[in-house]
Amino acid sequence: MVNCMDHFGALGTFMLAAQTRSFTEAGRRLGLSASAVGKAVARLEADLGVRLFHRSTRAITLTAEGGLFLERCNRIFAEYEVARNELTLAAGKPQGKLRVGLPQLGMKLMPHLIAFQQAYPEVELELEFSDRLVNVIEEGFDAVMRIGEVEDSRLVMRKLNGYSHRLVGSPDYFAIRGVPTHPSELGTHSCLRYRYPSSGKLDSWPLISGTEGAVSDVPRSATANAIEPLLAMAEAGQGIACLPDFFVEEAVAAGRLVSVLEEHVRDYRTFSILWPWSRQPLPKIKAFVEFMAARLG
């Protein structure tokens, strides 16, 4: 029989494997090999005398016993979280691990996140950048920063400054290819498109063509599932990119990029911080929300 602390670690490994349905992904998040995760689960199964997972070459799925055990583990960790939160509140200052989910373009927020670290050195930031729609509560996030409207009664939301898009290209590109004056002219241009890494879909350009309404047919000469490569290609004269205004403002001000078709771009995307109601009183979450809101509006 392993001791209580060993049990607690094994339970956490089991829960993460159940959540991700992958020993490999669970190991990546824990900093372990897939083999180490598999062995930890096997030891737990041997100790309990039941099989917790069905294993195949493609995936793992919970057995009936594994599903029941997962419910119990969730209760155990929920009680632990309540106890930990009570102690944190008693200490009265922001401290401990703060797990934050951000979209890919959240990389542009790194100066603010670094400033938060410097202001609150006892808070350990754990950042996860992804465009997938994470489940804030079930995946154990303390807070997430999201684009667009969110409806979830279990979450508290604080709106920040939103952003719009701008169509940009380099002066050299426009000197060679000409400056488009109407969205219909984009068909003869090289367009650099963003592809969502989670869904594989192309991000539509928010263009309006006068009385004809929205423009949906925009060609593509290159695609990327991150903003930074599109910005680099646009600055290198490879084409026109549709990028968030706060990503391109410095390059436009410096003359490396030129904004076009501004009267035809129609969009505004909200940006918010969300966190679980159950964790609202925690000093670390309150400090993070207030700090980011002060910087981002």
Image (cartoon, rainbow, N blue to C red):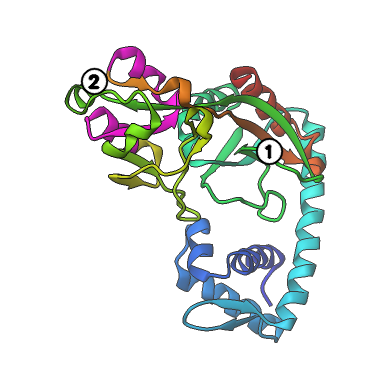
Which-is-in-front pick, marks 2 and 1? 2
- Residue in the foreground of this view, choosing between 193 and 102: 193
Q: How much space separates mark 2 and mark 1, taking CA atoms?
A: 36 Å
Secondary structure, mark 2, is helix
Q: Are there few (<14), some (14-19), or many (20+) residues within 10 Å of tag 2?
A: many
Q: Which residue was labeled with disc 2?
A: 171
Residue under the point 54% across and 63% down: 26
Q: Are there few (<14), some (14-19), or many (20+) residues within 10 Å of tag 1?
A: few
Q: Amino acid at mark 2?
A: Pro
- Point out residue 241 in the picture as x, y percentages from the top left corner: 35, 33
Looking at the magenta stretch, what is its main secondary structure? helix
- Residue in the foreground of this view, choosing between 195 and 292: 195
Residue 149 tag number: 1
Give the extent of the magenta segment.
Answer: 229-255
Instruction: Give the residue at the far left of this rendering.
Output: 176
Q: Which of the 4 image quadrants contains residue 295?
A: top right
Q: Quarter of the image containing the N terminus?
A: bottom right
Residue under the point 59% across and 21% down: 296
Instruction: Give the residue at the far front of this rendering.
Output: 211
Q: Is residue 11 above or below residue 240?
A: below
Q: Amino acid at mark 1?
A: Glu
Q: Is residue 96 above or below residue 72?
A: above
Q: Relative to residue 223, is residue 94 drawn left or right?
A: right
Q: Is residue 60 above or below residue 177?
A: below
Q: Relative to residue 124, is residue 64 drawn left or right?
A: right
Q: Which of the 4 image quadrants contains residue 18?
A: bottom right
Q: Quarter of the image containing the C terminus?
A: top right
